[in-house]
Structure formats: C-alpha cells, structure tokens
Image (cartoon, coloured by chain):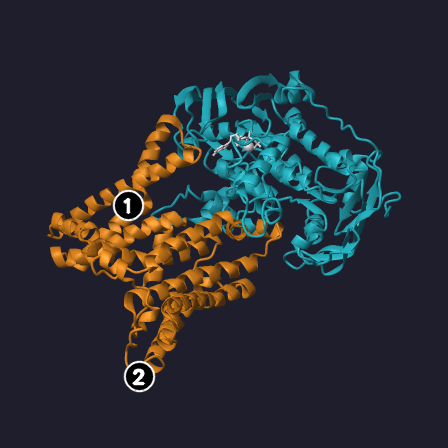
Chain colours: A cyan, B orange
Amino acid sequence: MNVVEMRGITKCFGSFTANDNINLVVKKGEIHALLGENGAGKSTLMNILFGLYQPELGKIFIKEKEVAITGPTMANELGIGMVHQHFMLVQPFTVTENIILGDERASSGMIDYKKAEREVQALSDQYGLQVDPRAVVADIGVGMQQRVEILKTLYRGADILIFDEPTAVLTPQEIDELTEIMRKLVKEGKTIIFITHKLKEIMSTCDRCTVIRRGKMIDTVNIVETNENELASLMVGREVSFDLDKQPANPQEPVLKVQSLEVDDKRNNPAVRGLDLEIKAGEIVGIAGVDGNGQSELIEAICGLLKPKSGRVILNNKDVTGLTPRKITETGLGHIPEDRHKRGLVLDFSVSENIILQSYYKKPFSNGFGIDYKAVGEYANKLIQEFDVRTPDKDTPARALSGGNQQKAIIAREVDRNPSLLIAAQPTRGLDVGAIEFIHNRLIQHRDTGNAVLLVSLELEEVLKVSDRVAVIYEGKIQGWVDPKTATEEELGLLMAGSKVKGGTSQ
Amino acid sequence: MIGKLNRNSTLISSLISIVLGMLVGAIAMLLSGYDPIAAYGALFGSIFGSASDMGETLRTITPLIFAGLSVALAFRTGLFNIGVEGQLVIGGLAAAFVGLKLDLPPVLHAIVALVVGTLAGAIWALIPGLLKAIRGVHEVIVCIMMNWIALFLSNYMVGKVLSNNSDSTEKIHPSASIRVDFLTDLFDGARVHLGLILAILAAIFVYVLLFKTKLGYELRAVGLNPSASEYAGMSVKRNIIISMMISGGIAGLAGAVELLGTNEYLSINASLPGTGFDGIAVALLGANTPMGVVLSSMLFGGLFNGGNNMQYVAGVPFEVIRIVFATIILFVAANIVKQVGNRKSRKKKGENAGA
Ligand SMILES: Nc1ncnc2c1ncn2[C@@H]1O[C@H](COP(=O)(O)OP(=O)(O)OP(=O)(O)O)[C@@H](O)[C@H]1O
Ligand SMILES: [Mg+2]
C-alpha cells in the first residue's frame, strides 16, 4: 500500500521555486530516504506533508485517500509526525511536559502528570528509546532530545514518521542507536521518511531513495540496486570524487602554540586540563575525540570567548591568552563555530549583513562611522557566487536559508578573510556530499597558501581524510598523535576511549 | 519590489483596521446610549477641523514620537526601557534649571537648555544601563525605581530650589522658549512649537543611526543575537550602555521640549506623566521602526486630543472614549485585516516569502 503519495507538488517562495512538480511515493513499512543537495527543497517538501506550508499545485494522498493538509494538527490526525531539522522543545520543561504539550489529555481540566509519565515511559520502553520522562530538557544531551522528539510523534499515534536530518547533530555512537530505533519502529509497522546527507546511512538502513535536485525530482531508486557513487551523481548531477586531491603538507614555522592550557566549562568544571598543541603554517591538524572531552572549550579559549584558567595561547608569536575576541581575530584567526545558530549567524540579519559580521567596522565597509551598504552588497554577491551559497538574493534573512547554505555563508566569510589560523569546528555538519567536497578542498587550499588549519570534527572519516596530523583528545588532554595515512579507525577508537597505544605520546 | 508592495498593503490594511475598530467602537457607544455620529464628528473635527485644533493635535503627537523612538531604539538592542518616564521628567527638570537660572542670548539659551535636558536623560538612563551591563540587573527593575526617584526629585526641586515653597516655578525666561510666533500664528494660537520639527529630526536620526552606521549595525546585532555579536568581537556590555544612553537622551530631549515649548514652567506632580508608557505602545505598534513610530504617534496623538473634544461636544464619558480607543488600537495592533487577507491569499497561492 502507498501510505504517502505526493503528486506534482509545486511550492514557491516569492519568485523562487523550491519544489517544482515533485512526485513522491512511500510504501507502507519502508524506510524511504530523501536525498538532495543543500537547498534542494527536502525540508520544504516535508513541511508541506506536515501541513506547515501549502503547495501552489499538486495533490497529496494519505493511505490512498486524497487529503488537504491544512496544518500540523490535521497532519497529526492523519498519523503524520515530524522530527524537525532544528528541535522544537521547550527547554525548561520536563520530557513529559514537552511530549504532552499540545496534546494534553486532561480530565476535568486537570492534567494527570503521573499517568502521562507512565505512558511516556511505556512508549519509551516499547521502542527502546531510553528516555527519562522526568528529566528537564535543558539538562539532557542532543541525542536524548532527539529521542524526545520521536516520542512526541509516537505519543500522538503517528505511523508515518518524518525525520529531517536527525543524524547531522549526533555522535557516531548515537547514530548507531538511532538506526536501531528506526529498525524497531518499522518492525512495529511504522513507515519512515528519512532525510540525510550521509550516503552510508542510506545504504545501510533504507529500502528506497528519492533524489531531488534543485527543486525537481530526479528518480526513485531501490537501495539494493544502487551504490554510493550512483546516488551521489544522481543528486549533484555530475560525478563526485570521494578522494581528495591533496599534496603532502609542507609545514613551516609554528602559527599556534597552546601551552599547558586549563579551561573550565560553563558550570565551572575542568574541561581542558593542561593541554599542549602546536600547529604550523602549511599543515592541517585534526582533533578527534568523543564529544565532550574539552573540544568546545579548547576552541572557545583560543578564540577568547572563554577565559583560560591557566596556560598560554600564542598566535603568530604573540601571546593572546585572555585577550578579547576582536584582538585575537585581528592577530590572524578565523573561526567556523560549531553551533552556527548560536555563534555563527544573526539569523534575522540578511545574508549580506551576516557576510560582514567580522569585518563591518573596517574599510571598505566602514570608514569608522557609517556603513557603506552598497560596498557590502557587492562583496556579498561576490562571495555568494564564489562559494555557491544558494539563496534567493543577498537581502534574504539568513533564517530562510537551508542549513547547508547557512554554513556555506559562514565559511565564505571566514575563509575569505584569509586568516593565518583557521579553526573549523564541525565544518561539514549537515552538508551534502558536493558541499563537503567543496569545503574540504577550500580547507586544503587554505593550507596550501601557507596558513594553518585546526579541524575539529566528530567524524573520524573526515578527520582522517583532511588532516595532515591527527591529535586525539581525551578528558581535556591530548591522548596521542596518529598519522592519518596509516592510522585505522580502530586505533583511533582506542585512543579516544582513553587507552594509550603504541607510541601514543606527543609527536 | 515585494518589500514595497508589502509596505503599501500594511498601510492600507492599517487604515482599514482603524475603520473596523471605529465600527466596533460605534456599537459600544450605541449600546451605552450615545450618538456615535456626533462623537466621531467631534473626534475628526478636533483632528482636522480648525487650524488651532490641528495644532493642538500636532503638539500632542510630538512627545509621543520622542517617547516611541526612545523605546524602539532600546528594543532594537534587546532592552526594555520602561524608564522613559523618569528620563523625560529629568530632562524637563534640567531644562527648567537652565531656562530659569541662566541668562543667555535668545537662540543660544534654548539650545543650551535642550542639550542639557538631553544629557540629563542620557545620564539617568546610564544607571540602569551600567547595572545591566556590569551586574546583570534587569533594566526593568532599575528603570521603575529610577522613575520614582525622578518624580520626587523633580517635585523637591520645584518646591525647594526653583521656587519659594510654591507648587510651581515661574515661567522660564523667554530667551529659552522654543515657541515661535510663526508656528503659533500658522496654527491660530495653538501651542505648536519647534519640538515637532525636532521630533521629526529625531526620527531621521534614529533611522540613520540604526540602518546606516556602524554603531547601529552593532546595536541591532546585539539585540538579535548577543552570542554571535560576542563571537564577532563586539562588546555586548558597551552596546547595552550606549543604547540606554541614546534612548535616555531622546527621552530627556522630549522632557526638555515639553517644558520649553508646551508648558514653559515646571510644577509639582502627583504622578508620572504617562508619556513614556504610551511610548511603549507607540513603539510596539510601529514595529520599532522610526517611520512606524511617527505613524503610530499620529494615531495615538489624534485619538488623545480628539478624545477631549468627544467628551465636550458629544458628551461621551471618558471611560467610553477609552473603550473606543482601545478597540481601535487593538484592531490595528492585531492587524486583523492583514491576517484575514493573508489567509485568503495563502489558500490561493501560498504564503509570501517576505510576509
Ligand atoms: N521561508 C522561506 N522563504 C524564502 N525562501 C525559503 C524559505 N524556506 C526555504 N527557502 C528556500 O528554499 C530552498 C529549499 O530549502 P529547504 O530548506 O527545503 O532545503 P533542504 O533541501 O532541506 O536543504 P538542507 O539539506 O540544507 O537542509 C532554499 O534555497 C531556501 O533558501
Ligand atoms: Mg533541510
């Protein structure tokens, strides 16, 4: 049975067509992947299915009956649930409060929280979600927040589940757990539409895959009859090379020296505990590690966003320990932050206003008093072109860009300033394979022009592929160094778990 | 293109909202037994009627523009300046000091009084700004305290320093007045003064500041996302302090203008003037844009001034007038026309990207 059938869906934003005559057929009990570049229109299509947007043209059939989905409430009634790309949870509420929000089953005006908690617990057990119904959302990790979102849809009785890029923000371990959960859901008779940019995940978990390119539907393929390369070229419209064209590094004088650095996290617990690190011009140093081992605090301390407790940070032979972010930036730092919505962008600013976030006060954009918005616009258009940021125009608010294109705008801003040290934290999170290829090449190009790059990523594959040297961070210290050309993921895995393996000291 | 269309349709839908609000108001008046036609006649008569009526309306609009701009500017930096009241009182007090105690040549005297009033307001706002930036104390609490301090300080000064135990001061020296014969004659004796022109200039100033200068870029960035602003090397604290000072300066100028143009003397007051609180509504209705503030000030000012006339001419009690006004403002604020219009066009062709 076709549980979902979308026929000839067209959706425009102003003069821009985000979905152009798209057909999507999802069969009962399958995991159906939706694949497409950043800005291809995947989230838009799913928002239409969930009733958040109304299409200009097209028909939707749910369980073989034609429907007009006027809003999320209606979608809920039809058994459609959605886990959004960016979570929609009320931070100070408990898990249970979040789950029943909007679907409070009150008797004579009173909510029976005990009963709701029991129901949430039962659902969580049924699907192996391991969620604590009484935990406050602000205190739980990203992975659990996501499972809360899943529970929310299950609590409303959804049997068609839309997962919009759930794995982009998860650690490799959490991704494995989520895959298990999805398998269990399908076994219980649910149908899943799964958006991801990771071809491996599609190959290992999905049954069929629909590919969208620039708003148009390209094809729907059976996973058993295809491979990663075919998927990638269907999606991008050209051959994608998975191998980087990379010359050996040519390290020069040191650009960054971190000496016995100690940093506390926001709750005043030690996060970085006496860390030493040196990066030279002309090399890319990767940092691998399990999330929460001091990576974020290390970066924030180098950038001046957190004050180190002790130790020194030396950039371009200048002691920048504890200086303001502006001073450090001007000493030659570029920073692609890990949380693009919190640090990287002012979402309600236009793309061009965001492009000058680090340079608005300098010539040619400002003479010290006014801002020359004409010069800003020209510069923004240049970068939009050069970095292929897909946006209706430079004046569109950053909020309206697809996740991947928001990231490209940040990368354009940071790379184009040509900093002697570029810190890239999770630079390809949520990006499509074409964009990842592009960004990896930009990082290498940045190295080849004689600059240093510090790459921090939770994806081992990325760290091993792009870096010239890899340091493993464990409990706020460098646990060991490996050579990415010879190291195996197992070797890294051991170091990341805290064991010292052969020669695993400082290089 | 789309932006322009939208702006036009906003204006039109606001006008329709006003008419709908008036219709509901008319029903309210009919139900309580008053004649809506006579009442609205009186309202419009006082807004568009004689030159002197129009002049008085313009005079009412003037402080609302200042107060609205002051609140809107702080809002843009993420601050809720509920202290416009106090800053306005202090601005008036400072201007009264200069107007009474200094002897200066005509034009210079007024300019000095205006500048001192502006500075006084800025300094009054500096205190909540500093406490917010350095100690993290919420500005609303400090501002409310500062409002009362301002009121009683002003009352004390009037009684003990600026007069001899009387409950109002003398008139300020004519050299400090910003009334001009030309305007008074034009509007047939109404108390219109140069403040109106200053208010328009202030609106232009705020527009240029926010959307054309480096400082404005920082203020807006800090208001929208302090974390990203910090990442971009801006000092969030510095911008909070500056925003409060400019906001307070505009409020102080409003107080000075009222004193030097409208009242020309200072008296003891039992309560705060209320202009600052109206400014909050004006700013919100005007979507925190300078142009929006000017337009919504015109609506509020027209209603306030016309309300008196409704009372005298049509005999509608003040309470009912307030109900009618609240209905109109509610209709405009909720922009009911636009909501309905949007839903219709969404059904037809999907929501607009810029909406
Ligand atoms: N509200 C909006 N207003 C204007 N344009 C929009 C809006 N929402 C989306 N778009 C545009 O529509 C296009 C498709 O966006 P969508 O979010 O569907 O992409 P996506 O395929 O989910 O990409 P990603 O993988 O990066 O999340 C993008 O170019 C985006 O800029
Ligand atoms: Mg998306």
Q: Chain of mark 2?
A: B
Q: Secondary structure at mark 1?
A: helix
Q: Kindly identify the residue that appears in the image at 47 percent across and 57 percent down.
A: B79
Quarter in which the C terminus of chain B is drawn: top left
Q: In front: A90, or A398?
A: A398
Amino acid on which disc 2 is placed? Asn
Quarter in which the N terminus of chain B is drawn: top left
Q: Residues within 10 Å of mark 1 (few under 14, many from 20)?
A: many
Q: Is residue B275 left or right of residue A41?
A: left
Up-down: is A15 above or below A122? above
Amino acid on which disc 1 is placed? Phe
Up-down: is A23 above or below A126? above
Please tell me the numbered disc located at residue B331: 1
The percent coordinates of residue A321 (x first, y second) are: 73, 58
The percent coordinates of residue A226 (x first, y second) are: 66, 17
Q: Is residue A89 left or right of residue A479?
A: left
